[in-house]
Every structure is written in structure tokens, then in C-alpha cells.
Image (cartoon, coloured by chain):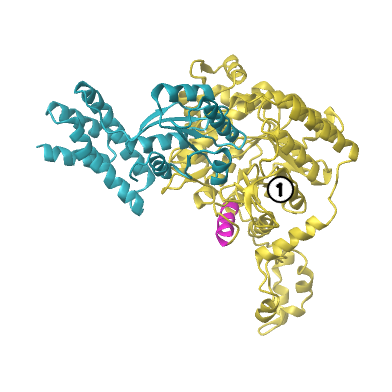
Amino acid sequence: MSEELLKAMAQSIIDGESEIAADLARQAIEAGLDPLTAISKGFVEGVNQVGDSFACGDVFLPELVMAGEAMKAAIAVLEPELKKRGAAREVLGKVVLATVEGDIHEIGKSLVGTMLTASGFEVFDLGVNVPADQILAKAEEVKADIIGLSALLTTTMVRQKEIIEAMDARGMRNRTKVMIGGAPVTSDWVEKIKADGYSEDAIGAVNAAKLLLDAPA
Amino acid sequence: MHFSSRLLSDSEKERAHQETLRILSEAGVLYHSEKALHLLETNGAVVDWAKKIAHIPEEMVVQTLQTAPKDFVLGARNPLHDYPLPSEVSRYALDGTGAFALDFVTGERRYGTDNDSALGLRVFQAMDMGVGAWAPVSAEDKPAHARPLHEFFTMMKYTSKHGQHEVHNVRQVPYLAEGLIAVMGGEDEVRRRHAYSLIYCPVAPLMHDGPMMDAYLELGSLDMPVMTLPMPVTGTTGPVSLFGNICVANAEALSTILVIQLCHPGRPVIYSSATGTMDLRNGSYLGGTPEMGLMSAALAEMGRFYGLPATSAGCTSDAREPGPDAVLEKVITSIAPVLGGSDIIVGFGEVDSDQLLVLEQIVVDNEIAHFCERIFQGVDVQQEKVLTEDILTLGPGGNFLTRRSTRRMARSGELYISDLLDRHTLEQWTKLGRPGLYSNARKRVEQILSEPMVDPLPDQVLGAMEKILAGADKELAGYTQS
């Protein structure tokens, strides 16, 4: 029974079916299945398969994103049960994400959030047009391992620099790494403002985050 | 007759209009501008103030659109470059605000500077198919709080063609106004000539920036035309289908025009779009695809459906560097809006998804524009082109090179002569070092830049502009809203 259930869980992720994934998660709880087993032997198997197929070019981004959304739906059901049992799923790291102040472009940042969540990070997405103080306060509150800063405009890129300087001033850089992204961001800019990590796209952001935390790619 | 296309039938355009009306009233549009929301609410929209979303009813859309001018002349500092809208033919605008430039001397790709814009604008000035300038790169060497003003002023300085650019907030408005008045020689001239316009990009899907919108409403006092350039991307910031994305772009365009008209009825507006498609492998924006060309053409038809001057992005490419990939994509994204009757196609000079300015590309794109123009001109069947008499006179085996008609039409445009493509014989071409489109374009750029600047502004005006910019650099510092 549980073997079949685990397979169905993986399949729900591969199919990108959030409702089915959530339903299977509920079934697992009712059947008394360990939520950690449901995650690692069930849903994560699906994530891994989709990830591998995506890397080979057999899966397109919308399919990957829907798999990520299904994973989120399953976790949302299982997380309270985990807490009840005093257990916690393995989280690769905590990430505070935001589009910087003066910039209301959202999609790229949100895509990074989905990819990170699906890959095992805990993501706190603060949205768009977020002032530096708010980002730093949240990072301190949740003890973030990474702050991710998105900017689409050349005029708002400077906010990334200002936030890094503010982190320096607060002595946060040892505890928290900074990743930046956005269409005008380049590795030269990363170097110039002394950010820790960067990726040209949302997929690469997962590996960049893992690298920063010495997690296996 | 002209070779033109009809992408959407009348009923399909009506369908797009109806779907757009549903989007505007049911989903509504988010405005980060309180002023815009007040205008909309006062005139009949239902505003959810907590969400900043205006639900705009059909009657209001239809009624408000009526005040938008159906035609006007897009003026230029040098009136020889005035361009009446709508136009029978398609002409082009320089692409704008790319983040990067390919250094003409070193070949290095780097962030764009004020000087890159100046060079791009000087080259653009010499392009006969180009009618509208746009500061081609974001000037990274200028302070962010005054950057758009520097870019705007550089554009006014280095080209006497029509110029369109942007400002980012109300604080920048008086500096721009002062600069425009200095250049045009008076406030009335700014208002009357429409030599400078504003380019406005809604944030897809269905959102409007606050500070920028407020600034643009303020500039209505100078009657500055506004080109609205919605940019939904199929599958990410817009629905995945072309038709769905067209409806979102249309809703964004109309939701801009409505606010502009409510604030200043009769202010000139230009309907436009710069849609993209998602790269299915990594989610990136693509602007050099056949689908983008189709959406541009269809949206130009929608602009025409509303009786507005209708333009579109096009001549765009996602190639990382100039070359065959860029030419392929630029041709396909130009020809569709040309055949669709777009008044202006915005895209000269940049590759890498509108992010990289390449001076040679401006010249190459001008050539692509000529090729597309020739296709558009079609097959002329006026009497002088029939020439059956010549065929009868010469009969089988005749040599048409000896006919007067051949000599006469050699200079008539019947056969397009390319200055840029190399047509030497194989051995001559080899001896010449195998010249091609880009190497010839490079020579042309060198020549343009070695010549004196065309239509320079008087020293007195330049001095005034410097002073205004120095003031903006100092007085706007610390004002962070972009």
C-alpha cells in the first residue's frame, strides 16, 4: 500500500498536479505514514526525476514549475503534521527574497522562489518594491542564510549595492550571503558590489544557492 | 498594389476587443498611481483602493477613447524630419534603454554610457528609414537619480529627428520641461511641434508604475505625446497563447491611454506594443521570434481598429552578438509589422533581447528596413510598368538591356539597389577581403562619425542644458524613487 502511495506521490509531482499531490499527502497522514518518508521517498523522487529530465532538455520550464507548485502543495499539507511529531524536514537553507525598492517587476523573483522551494530551501518572499530595512529585518528575524535581491532596471540595480553596504554596516555578512539577479545584472556587477552569488536565470539560482551553503549540487 | 497582410479578420478584432473589455472590467488594472485611480474613479471606474485595482466599465473605455487624436504630426527639431501619423508606410525608431553597449573600438561588451548613446544617435541621424530616436542605452556613468534626464538631453543634442524617452518620477519633470523649452525655443513650440514624446511601459500583466505614470500625467501640460508599449510575455507575464497575450497587451495599452485622456483630453497618444515569448527551456524573455512578429502585426491592427496611430516593436533579436542569428530574427520581426501596416517599428540597433547596442547594427537594420519596404511596395502594375510593347518589339531572344524603359527604371526604385550587401564577383570579393553586411556597416559608421555632427544645437542652448543637468544632479540627489 505505502509503496503504491509513494509511487503515486512521485507521479503527482511529475504530472504537476497540485491537488492530487495534496490529496496524497493527506492520505499519507491518515494512513499513519511518516511525513518525512512521504517527502523523501515519495514526492522528492518526483522532483528529482523532473529535475533530471529538465536538465536533459526533455522537460520544459512550465512542466518544471508545475512540479514545483505540486511539491509546495504537498509540503503545505505535511508540514503541520511534521511539527506535531516534533520533526522537521531537511531544509537546505532559509532564503529571504525581494525585488528591491522602486522596482515592481515580480515574475523572475517569484520563479526563483518556486525553484528554491522545490529544491528544499525555505523561502520568505517579501514581494516587490521592498525597502532595504524591511528586507534586512526579515533576514535577521528568520536568521536567513541567504538574501536574494532582484532588480530589472539599471536605475534600481543600485539598491542591491546599497543593501549590501547596509549589511556590511550591520555586520550581517558572515551569517547571511547575498544573491542578486535581474536582466541587467552581470558577473562584473556582482564583483563590483561584492555580492556572494548570482545566476543568469532561475534554474541556475538553485545551484548558486547550494554553492553558497556548501550543499551538494 | 501594396503587399499588405490582414492578420485578424474584422470579427477576430471585435473578439479581441470584447475579451479586452472583459479583462478591464472584471480583472481590472492595478495602478500604483493614486492620481490615476482618482481620475478613473471620478469617471466611472470601480476602484478597490486596498488593492489599487480599477475595474473599468465598457462605456467608459469606448467614450474615453474618442478624445484621443486620430492623427497628428510627430514633429522633429528639424522639421524636415516631421513624420505624420498615421502613415501609409512603415518607418523605424531606434531601440532604447539597453543596459549594455558593444564598444565600437575594443569590441568589448560593457554597461552603456552617455557617450554610447551619443554615438548611436549620430549614426541613427544618418539612417533614412529612421524617424524616431530613443536614447539607446541607459547611461550607467550618470547618477541614477538624474539618469533619464541625461539620456533625454543627450538624445535632443545628438539627433534632430523626433525623440522619445522617459522620466521616472515627478521630481524630474521640471528639469525635463526646462530642457525641452530651451531646445525648442519656447513652451508653445514644445506644445505645438510635438518634437519629443514619452515612451511608457506598463508592467505586465495589467499593472502601472506609480511615479512614472504621475510624471507622465504632469507632462500633459506640455502636450507631450505618449507611446504606450505593453510588454506581456507569452507564458510568464501573459497567457501562453498569442491571442491571449494580444488581449493582455491591448488591455494594458488601453488602460494607459484612458488615464492619459482622462487627465488631458485630446493629448496625442501612440498605440504600440513590445510583446515577447517565453523561452520554454529557461523562462527568459525572447523578442526575436516569429510569434513576436505576429503579435506586433496583430496589435498594430488593433491600434488601427481604435483609429489610433499604431506602432509596434520589431526588428528585434535575441542573438547575443551581431551576426546571422540577429539578421534572421530581425527580418522576421520586421516584415510582419511592415505588412501589418505599423506606422513605426521600434527596434533599430540592438540585439540580445534589446539589451545590447551595436553601432553597426543600426546600419544593418536600416538595410533590413529597405528590404522590407521593397516587399511592401509590391508589384506595380501601373501602365508604365506593363511594358508589353517592349516585349512585342524585341520578341523572342531580345536584349532588354537596350530598352529606354530599362535605363529609365534603373533609378526608379523598381529594382532595389543595396549599398550594404557586397555584389562584387567572386574573385573581386575575395581580393577585397570578403566584405559583407557587417564590415560594410562598420565602414559606414566610421564615415558617419568622422563627419561633422548634423544639426548641432547652438552653444547657448547647450550651455543652458548643461546647467539644467548640473542642477538635477545636485538637487535630485538622495531622492531614491525610480
Inspect the magenta stretch and tell me whether residue B326 lies in it. yes
Q: Chain of mark 1?
A: B
Q: Residue furthest left?
A: A1
Give the letter of the yellow chain. Answer: B
Magenta residues (range): B324-334
Quadrant location of the N terminus of chain B in the rendered image: bottom right
For residue A26, side relative to residue B93 (left or right): left
Depth check: give the residue in front, B325 or B463: B463
- Foreground: B476 or B336? B476
Q: Looking at the image, is B200 positioned above or below residue B39?
A: below
Mark 1 = which residue?
A: B116
Q: Is residue A184 left or right of residue B176?
A: left
Residue at left offset 70%, top offset 61%: B441
Magenta span: predominant SS is helix
State the image coordinates of residue B10 (x, y, percent, origin top left). 53, 41
Lateral position of residue B282 relative to residue B427, left or right:
left
Is residue A184 visible in the rendered image? The answer is no
Quick one: which residue is furthest to the bottom in this view? B397
- Label 1: element kind: helix
Tell me which chain appears cyan: A
Residue A139 placement: quadrant: top left
Is the C terminus of chain B in the top left, top right, bottom left or bottom right quadrant? top right
Kindly tell me whether residue B426 is visible in this rendering. Answer: yes
Asked whether residue B299 is drawn in magenta, I would say no
* B117 displayed left or right of B7: right
